[in-house]
Image: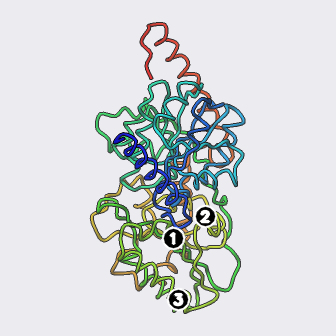
Amino acid sequence: MRRLLIDLRRRAQTAVLRVIRSSPVFPKSLVDRQGEDVRLASSSLDATVMVYFPGAPDTLYQVVPWLPTFEAVHAAHRAVVVCQDSRVAASIQAVSTVPVVTVARYGTLDGLLARSDVKVALYVSHQPRNFENLRFASLLHAYIGHGDSDKGVSASNQLKAYDYVFAPGRAAVDRITRRLMRFDAAAHTIVVGQPVTLSAVASDPPSEVRTTVLYAPTWEGAQPSVAYSSVLSHGLAVVAALLRDPRFRVLYRPHPLTGVTSRDYALADDAIRTAIAAAGAPHETVLADQEPLESSFARSGVLVADVSAVATAWLPSLRPVIVTKADGEAVSADSGMLGVVPRLVVGDAAATPTVVAEAIADVGGRAARSALVAYYLSEYWPDRSQERFVHVVGEVLAERDRLRDALVEAGATGT
């Protein structure tokens, strides 16, 4: 009887959790783990390449820009995206032809891989839950990230967990080489270009009476060493100064995660949005789910950004970029950009219109930015990045087969 009562209690708890996690108000910052585990219990994955993405809906921005490239990988090698959140899976399925499955239980994943011919796993972020998949020695694992930047985390010690790092350009390789101890970057990094960088090739800024200044800060980070955001320190002063100047139009694009770890940043973000709304047209706040980053780029003549991948992605436009300087403990890993572009310290935030005007007038700045493009984005960008990526995936697949065959021959394979 006691065992029956325990079983009934567990079933009831599971049912309640299922209802809670299926609720439309279940937080987007939490993984719902509403998987297809029952259906997948005896099936296999028809793929050789797995994109492992265990993130919650508020991290979709990390994987969505990669989807066109994953479609090319799928066409060449057969790919699948493995999620842990049903809402994430549904969002990807709505915009991509790459197969997607939702796996909630680790045991389900273990069985799937045992029955499948998956050989290579790709990761777009350093999710702690990546380790649930990194355990499998039957795969080669490659970190591809979701944009390159001079943030210290771009050369994180976490990179050692992967067999390969697919680097956007030489800047990333050099950054890793300079910062990581006991890591052979020459052996473990492969330059693949940057397929997710979709900003327009060098072109003239939009023709308009006012110059559009895109203010696109990053989020506050989870700890002081990665707190690169200027929203709290610079944000309102930057925007207020630009709103007062008739030469400029403000386009504010906050990071999707702004305020998730700090109420102060959430309040600062709200104050910026309120100021823009009060100023009215032509000033505007645009959110990441309202238009792609490249569309915001195309509408702007100048970028004000933090140390982030947004600044790197902007480089090929050759238009002026101003990078803020965090007023705190954030660690940068400058690969050259931060010594070339203007920096905006907290004390100069109210003078942003002057800094922007000087950047526009700096004719030599365009040549300096041009020299950075090939270094950060490689010789493959823009026309051959996707082709290069698919080719490198094929090479890693072939290497995995050679290595695995050698282990089988030696009788030393494992999961």
Front position in the image: 208 or 80: 80
Q: CA distance from mark 1 to mark 2?
A: 10 Å
Q: Amino acid at mark 2?
A: Leu
Residue pictured at 53% horizontal, 29% vertical:
113
Check the image and report above or below for 310 versus 381: below
Q: Amino acid at mark 3?
A: Leu
Front position in the image: 89 or 179: 89
Q: Position of residue 236 (x, y in %)?
A: 43, 83
Q: CA distance from mark 3 to mark 1?
A: 16 Å
Q: Position of residue 183 (x, y in %)?
A: 34, 34
- Which label was assigned to residue 296? none
Dot 3, crowdedness within 10 Å: few (<14), some or many (≥20)?
many
Q: Amino acid at mark 1?
A: Ala
Which numbered disc flags the more N-terminal residue, 3 or 1?
Answer: 1
Check the image and report above or below for 181 versus 309: above
Dot 2, crowdedness within 10 Å: few (<14), some or many (≥20)?
many
Q: Which residue is mark 3?
A: 243
Q: Which residue is mark 1?
A: 216
Q: Are marks 1 and 2 in contact (CB under 8 Å)?
A: yes
Q: Which residue is mark 2?
A: 293
Element type at marker 3? helix
Front position in the image: 356 or 1: 1
Give left or right: position of 342 versus 79.
left
Q: Position of residue 135 (x, y in %)?
A: 41, 32
Q: Position of residue 203 (x, y in %)?
A: 68, 65
* Quarter in which the C terminus is drawn: top left
